[in-house]
Amino acid sequence: MALVLKIVFLIFQVMICLVGFESVADARHRQDQKKSSFGDVKDLVTDLPGQPQVKFRHYAGYVTVNEKNGRALFYWFYEATTLPDEKPLVLWLNGGPGCSSVGYGATQEIGPFLVDTDGHGLKFNSYSWNTEANLLFLESPIGVGFSYSNTSGDYDILEDYFAANDSYVFLHKWFLKFPSYRTRKFYIAGESYAGKYVPELAELIHDRNKDPSLFIDLKGIMLGNPETCDAEDWKGMVDYAWSHAVVSDETHKTIKESCDFYSDDPWSNKDCTQGMAEYYRQYNEIDIYSLYTSVCIPSSEGKKSSLVTVRSSSSKMPRVLGGYDPCMDDYAKSYYNRRDVQKALHVGDGTTLIRNWTICNLTVYSNWSYSRTSVLPIYKKLIGAGLRIWVYSGDTDGRVPFLSTRYSLSSLGLPITMAWRPWYHQKQVGGWIQEYEGLTFATFRGAGHAVPIFKRSESLAFFSSFLSGDSLPYQRT
Ligand SMILES: *[C@@H]1O[C@H](CO)[C@@H](O)[C@H](O)[C@H]1NC(C)=O
Ligand SMILES: *[C@@H]1O[C@H](CO)[C@@H](O)[C@H](O)[C@H]1NC(C)=O
Ligand SMILES: *[C@@H]1O[C@H](CO)[C@@H](O)[C@H](O)[C@H]1NC(C)=O
Ligand SMILES: *[C@@H]1O[C@H](CO)[C@@H](O)[C@H](O)[C@H]1NC(C)=O
Ligand SMILES: *[C@@H]1O[C@H](CO)[C@@H](O)[C@H](O)[C@H]1NC(C)=O
């Protein structure tokens, strides 16, 4: 009798447990649904001037990354066009340093709304990458686009680690606004100087992931025409200019013989400086970011004295700005400096112009105080951790040419798993591809520095392959 009672009691307990568990699960499910159906409502963008009608939600605004100094970074987030709850989260960064991911990535390259060239509105991009993923654009670091600090001294200490730290804090604070993305599969992508930013941020995430409370499910990184290793990048720039008929045999020979790109200061050698001056002279006549397109002739005379923005100092490697089309840049500038646009994006209140938005902040660029000379050791670390790394190159870019990337990647000495071969898109060769153990490298035939501007359909297909981890089509089918 006692035993029967005990058993009945046990069954009763189990039932309570089950019921209890179910209701908790139910509640959690309800909560998740609530969370996933809305991010931070006050950041929801509802009436962006000139915006085409769309079915997905998008959000924009500030995230405070340092309360004491008053540092805030601006983001723009587009939910995936379909099934956002099932798709990964991808963070996109542009380079410079000092250039805006909103001005380049979001409104010229891969976002759903491209700036219309009359500067009055936006047009829909049917090749937007948010067809494949939830897309987050971040203006990083402070001084770029709408991002700022209330402490002017912060601007004097901008460098790689500073940028990575703020971006890392940004991510965690952003997840508080958008909790349903906290455990989502996460990727970081970017181009040009983001070739440094992306691996640096990935490394920081990887290192901090040892603390389970900080875990971010980083799966991989994707890099377009990325600055990777300064010495190899310079070598590639010079050889590319020669092999693409931009500089003479003599100039090439002078640079090859006198510039030691592995030294801290190749510019102390006078022959080297002269050779490079000639190199810049030639590139000032054409668009270094896209060799075979026409340069933008500014309407106002003398507005742009130089097409190649170079910063050089005797003690450091000179840098060349990573950005693109100066004409397109002006359209973006006039659009983002409208009061109604800034209001819609939660930058200002619409009565006064809060910020002068520029596509690249040249002060940030010229005041950049530290840049890692090579991120290849980070590649090794991330490959070792099993992260997916895909690198691509538009093959008509002279700024970070495919040759630079080839030199960098070959210095890694990774075993080749699939030999150099064409990849196809709509029955045409999209470019060439080589697969290494832990890394995939591909070129885009006929694309400049900002590949998606030139090859919208191809780059979307490439992005989709990257996310799924599938090889690109290697047959003309
Ligand atoms: C910066 O200062 C302005 C004006 O005082 C203030 O409105 C804003 O909230 C501050 N930003 C941050 C991130 O603290
Ligand atoms: C550019 O960056 C500098 C600091 O390097 C900052 O003082 C300035 O406000 C920024 N310009 C714009 C237009 O945001
Ligand atoms: C640039 O950096 C120098 C020191 O490195 C500093 O004195 C100057 O104020 C900075 N300029 C701006 C505009 O931040
Ligand atoms: C970045 O953050 C780490 C850890 O909080 C800190 O130790 C380091 O000094 C920071 N670096 C910079 C440049 O802010
Ligand atoms: C923007 O730039 C213009 C002209 O350079 C200047 O007059 C204005 O004060 C600036 N506005 C802000 C908010 O910085």
Image (cartoon, rainbow, N blue to C red):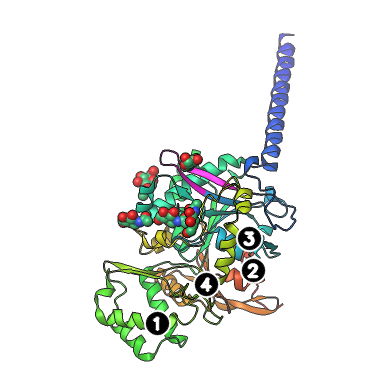
Q: Label the magenta part by its dominant secondary structure.
A: strand
The residue carrying mark 3 is: 111
Query: Magenta residues, as a range?
Result: 59-73
- Where, by quadrant of the figure, is residue 41 drawn? top right
Q: Is residue 288 left or right of residue 371?
A: right
The residue carrying mark 1 is: 281
| Sequence-wise first label, 2 or 4 | 2
Q: Nearer the viewer, residue 238 or 262?
A: 238
Q: CA distance from mark 1 to mark 3?
A: 34 Å
Residue 363 coordinates in the image, percent (x, y):
40, 60
- For mark 2, give the secondary structure: loop
Q: Nearer the viewer, mark 1 or mark 4?
A: 1
Vertical position of residue 456 compared to residue 239: above or below: above
Q: CA distance from mark 2 to mark 1?
A: 29 Å
- Amino acid under disc 4: His
Q: How many marks?
A: 4
Near mark 1 (Cα within 10 A), the count class, few <14, some 14-19 or many ≥20, is some
Quarter of the image with the C terminus is: bottom right
Residue extending furthest bottom? Answer: 249
Q: Nearer the viewer, mark 1 or mark 3?
A: 1
The residue carrying mark 4 is: 449
**Residue 66 lies in the magenta stretch:** yes
- For mark 1, give the secondary structure: helix
Q: Nearer the viewer, mark 2 or mark 1?
A: 2
The residue carrying mark 2 is: 117
- Amino acid under disc 2: Thr
Residue 413 coordinates in the image, percent (x, y):
41, 70
- Amino acid under disc 1: Arg
- Amino acid under disc 3: Gly
- For mark 4, give the secondary structure: loop
| Sequence-wise first label, 2 or 1 | 2
Q: CA distance from mark 4 to mark 3?
A: 17 Å
